[in-house]
Image (tube, rainbow, N blue to C red):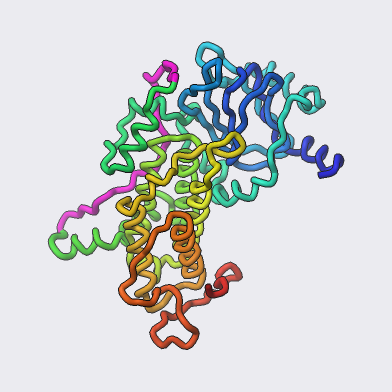
Amino acid sequence: MDAEMAMELVKHGLTLLFLDVPQHTLIGIDTQMFSVGPDFKGIKMIPPGPHFVYYSSSTRDGKEFSPIIGFFVDAGPSEVIVRKWDQQEERLVKVPEEEEERYCQAVRSLEFDRHLGPYNLSQYGDWKQLSNYITKSIIHRIEPIGGEITVASESTMHVNTPSTMMEKALDEQLNASRCSTPSDKSQTRGCYYTSIPRVIKRKGIHGQQLTSLNLDKTQLLESVLLEDYGGSEDLLLAELQFAYIAFLMGQSLEAFLQWKSLVSLLFGCTEAPFRTRSRLFAKFIRVIYYQLKQGLQKDCTDTNSGSTLLDDSWFSADSFLHRLFKDFFLLVQDASVVDGDLLSWTRKLKELLENNLGWEFQQNSAVDGMYFEDDDEFAPVVEMLDDPSSSVAPSV
């Protein structure tokens, strides 16, 4: 990057000014994480828009770290966000308004420029794939009071008891004692996630009809979309992205449970993907593809990338994800009509899981049902919707 372009990004990008942060503290933004050095005072050249900022204080030798604290921001061009380290609480806090204005002017005058680390623009594309549905209104709708997301406060919330080996492993990891600092939890309130029913219960419906409603979650999905998201599919996908980021980068158990609820709801539909909501499911599979692609990166725990808990134990063959993916792939295989985008992204997701995890999805026949020869009379009809984004990727 030449000097002129760099100066444009410095002037028009978002700047995070973090004052008095101790050495060895881990500070992250989006998919990037840094270890604080003696001259660190923040991050510059950040593209405007939504971002997730997170950090973890350390012991003096930098060997142990406290639970991560994270918060979402959505900033405009040339905006400056100022925080100062509170030594007693070991967290970043806002400064008084007059003091903040002085610091903002100093940043714009480049007084702090040599103390600010640049945002790695080569990773911005990855972040956009993880957050393209998140907006300022979504952040305000879901974020907790005060904006801070941390597992350290979740022990006082009414979080569901972990039910699977996978959830228990996460619960143990997140609540392990890692120089955790005491905090005031008396007024703690978690994120304002949408409540997703696990089971459909309706008066006057019994037996086979009730069983059918619970086997195919299409009607439940329609009800949730209408009542909780005002009919907007993008709002649902935004909450799915919000929860995954808060879990992956922020290490929030509450966020993981919400992500699991939304994923289970969508994968629990057998009619919607091929009839009423094919566009939604094409976008949903695309979101899941990029989430897992990021989560499965092997170098996610170094100080140049976002931290993650998605180690290999999370993706064992008996995990809930394996079961959901297997059932969905069989649905696509057996469907008589499939949207072009949905089929294309389903293939990509299947290949990602097979190549990165070694998962094998047994089919009902010797031929993989999602890959067909052009003249195969038993192949499903691939619908091409009148939308440029609906084109099918080349056959594999």
Dividing the picture into quadrants, the one containing residue 30 is top right
Residue at position x 69%, y 17% in the image: 98
Q: Say left or right for 54 vs 212.
A: right
Camera-nearest residue between 204 and 32 = 32
Residue lying furthest left in this view?
207
Q: Where is residue 119 in the image (x, y as percent from the top left)?
A: 69, 37
Q: In this view, does 163 lie above or below 370?
A: above
Residue 284 seen in this snapshot: no
Residue 181 belongs to magenta span: yes
Q: How many marks?
A: 0
Camera-nearest residue between 208 and 256 = 256
Residue at position x 64%, y 50% in the image: 125
Q: Quadrant of the N terminus?
A: top right
Q: In this view, does 81 lie above or below 348?
A: above
Dividing the picture into quadrants, the one containing residue 205 is bottom left
Camera-nearest residue between 80 and 205 = 80
Residue 186 belongs to magenta span: yes
Q: In this view, does 14 lie above or below 379?
A: above
Camera-nearest residue between 178 and 103 = 178
Q: Give the range drawn in magenta.
A: 179-204
Dividing the picture into quadrants, the one containing residue 23 is top right
Residue lying furthest top in this view?
88
Q: Say left or right for 110 vs 384.
A: right
Q: Where is residue 337 in the image (x, y as percent from the top left)?
A: 41, 77
Residue at position x 81%, y 40% in the image: 6
Residue at position x 55%, y 21% in the image: 62
Residue 293 seen in this snapshot: yes
Dominant secondary-structure state across the stretch colored magenta: loop
